[in-house]
Amino acid sequence: MKNIELLVLDMAGTTIDEDNVVYKTLTQAVNNHGYHVTLENVLSSCAGMEKLEAITSLLKEIGGNEKDASVIFQNFSEQLKEAYQKLEVKPINGTENFLLKMKAQHKKVVLNTGYTSEIAHQLLDKLQWKENIHFDALITADDVSESRPSPDMINLAMKKFNITEPEKVLKAGDSVIDIEEGKNAGCGLTIAVLSGAQSRTELEKAHPDYIFNTISEAEDIL
């Protein structure tokens, strides 16, 4: 069995259940600007991406005006802040135990996300997950110059904990772009989960090592 020392876990849809509120809000922000996209469109093309980039590529895909992206992103960010204040956020089944077990085995756990740092902190506050108890570090799109599928966030996580061999790293996420990020970093294990944005058929395209219902099922292979 591979000796995994570092787990890099995506947040929404992988460790945290926020009822797809991000993608619902993003859909609404795009449609409020006079476009017409469905939640399905948004999930399949934007899942896991840094959100300004996601909006830009979505507009390109539907033949919209890419110059609208920054205004839509502003509106999206404001609407999301409001939505999050009212939102009930919960851990995906079994996740909290899984994190505590991994920490007990002296593995490092890094949460990573295409969100801004502000949104990520809002989520963690709602869950009352604490650094050094549930996880060791949070790395967001704000911390790197290139977002997923670039391996920058994983490379930064490795650097933080002096891990030089990527085969000792596990990357898990609920979107193709998460798996691509893991592969680009040379991770020893890539795990896709069905608890979030994308379906098994979509996730299989990225060829993860495993596809589990939830991240806690990874316990059996660690």
Image (cartoon, grey):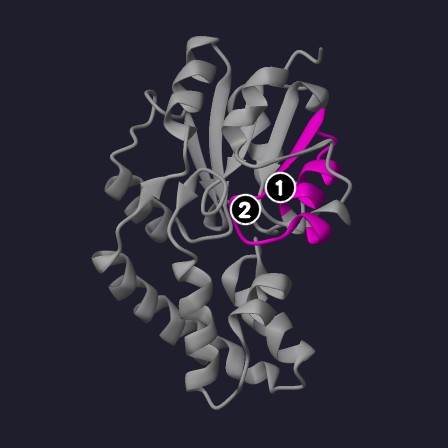
Q: Nearer the viewer, residue 98 or 111?
A: 98
In magenta stretch: residue 36? no
Q: Residue at x 52, y 20 (%)?
A: 161
Q: Quadrant of the N terminus?
A: top right
On the rendered structure, is 56 left or right of 102?
right
**Bounds of the magenta segment:** 178-202
Labelled disc at residue 144: 2
Q: Nearer the viewer, residue 18 or 182?
A: 18
On the rendered structure, is 154 left or right of 106?
right
Where in the figure is residue 131, as x and y percent of width and height? 33, 27
Which mark sits nearer the N-terminus, 1 or 2? Answer: 2
The kind of residue on which mark 2 rests is Val
Q: Residue at x 52, y 66 (%)?
A: 52
Q: Residue at x 65, y 82 (%)?
A: 62
Q: Quadrant of residue 57?
A: bottom right
Question: In 3D space, how far apart are the residues under numbered discs 1 and 2 (Cα atoms)?
Answer: 6 Å
Labelled disc at residue 152: 1
Where in the figure is residue 179, as x and y percent of width and height? 68, 42
On the rendered structure, is 94 left or right of 66?
left
Few, some or many residues within 10 Å of mark 1 (<14, 14–19, 20+): some
Q: Quadrant of residue 63?
A: bottom right
Tag 1, which secondary structure? helix
Whether residue 5 can be seen here: no
The relative height of residue 27 versus residue 188 in the rendered view (above or below) is below
Labelled disc at residue 104: none
Question: Are the residues tagged 1 and 2 within 8 Å (C-beta)?
Answer: yes
The relative height of residue 29 versus residue 99 in the rendered view (above or below) is below
Few, some or many residues within 10 Å of mark 2 (<14, 14–19, 20+): some
Tag 2, which secondary structure? loop
